[in-house]
Image (cartoon, helix red, strand yellow):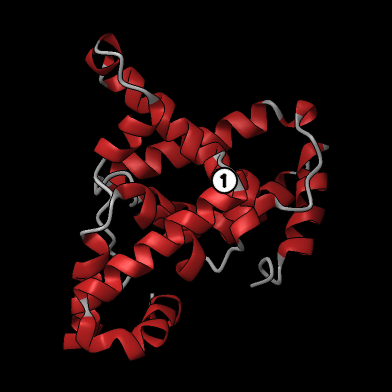
Amino acid sequence: MPVPVDEPLLAELWSRFKTGDEHAFDQLVELRYRVLFNYGTRFTKDRDYIKDCIQDLFLELWERRERLVDTPYVTIYLIKALRNNFIRQLKHDKPWLNSQGVEEDTLVENANVEIDLINAELLSEQEQALRRAIEQLPPRQQEVIFLKFYEGLSNEEIAQIMDVERQTVANFLYRALSQMKNLLPALVVFLPFLLRLFKKLA
């Protein structure tokens, strides 16, 4: 699936924001805040914590605006930056993890990545079964499912965000879908359709 249709607009706003255009910066925040917040729920259910991390990210970007590079893929840049900030913040908030030699991937996998993309009142019995199946996936596979089916990103774009090879993304996706088919044998035929509902109903 192609990048978001408003990506050229974001690239233009990004260039203007780098020169100190506050209005362009405000538009960037408004256009991508929800995407970043939804992505933050992959790491924690603490809404205030997510908001603080996003605020810190944008403050950091504003302060460093003159040193930022141009990018045609602002959405990917922002998601990747927020992901890195979450990992760094987790290390800071729980230093005892580092003393035990815990690596970044382990920090992410130990974080709460419950998928809450659709309001429970809107879910049918089949969709609730799909959600439960996704919640049983390993965290990295949950993240790939989120980026692929909720954000509509390509494997290449997901690889950039997660700092892995494109083939690794394909492997995560294959294993995730295979496991979900095993968990939902009665819904195998409808699985692609149900996954697309995540983007439509969220």
Looking at the rendering, in which quadrant would you find the N terminus?
bottom right
Name the residue nearer the viewer: 33 or 140: 140
Q: Residue at x 37, y 54 (%)?
A: 141
Q: Nearer the viewer, residue 179 or 140?
A: 179
Examine the image and state in which quarter residue 196 appears.
bottom left
Q: In front: 180, or 48?
A: 180
Name above or below for residue 145 compared with residue 81.
below
Tag 1: Cα neighbours inside 10 Å, few (<14), some, or many (≥20)?
Answer: many
The quadrant of the image that shows the C terminus is bottom left
Q: Secondary structure at mark 1?
A: helix
Q: Amino acid at mark 1?
A: Ile
Q: Is residue 196 visible?
A: yes
Q: Position of residue 100 (x, y in %)?
A: 24, 13
Residue 67, image x and y in percent?
A: 77, 26
Residue located 72% across and 62% down the image: 7
Tell me if I can see residue 33 in this picture. Answer: no
Q: In the shown orientation, is residue 167 left or right of residue 49? A: right
Name which residue lies at 41% across and 34% down.
Answer: 86
Q: Is residue 113 above or below residue 58?
A: below
Q: Which residue is mark 1?
A: 161
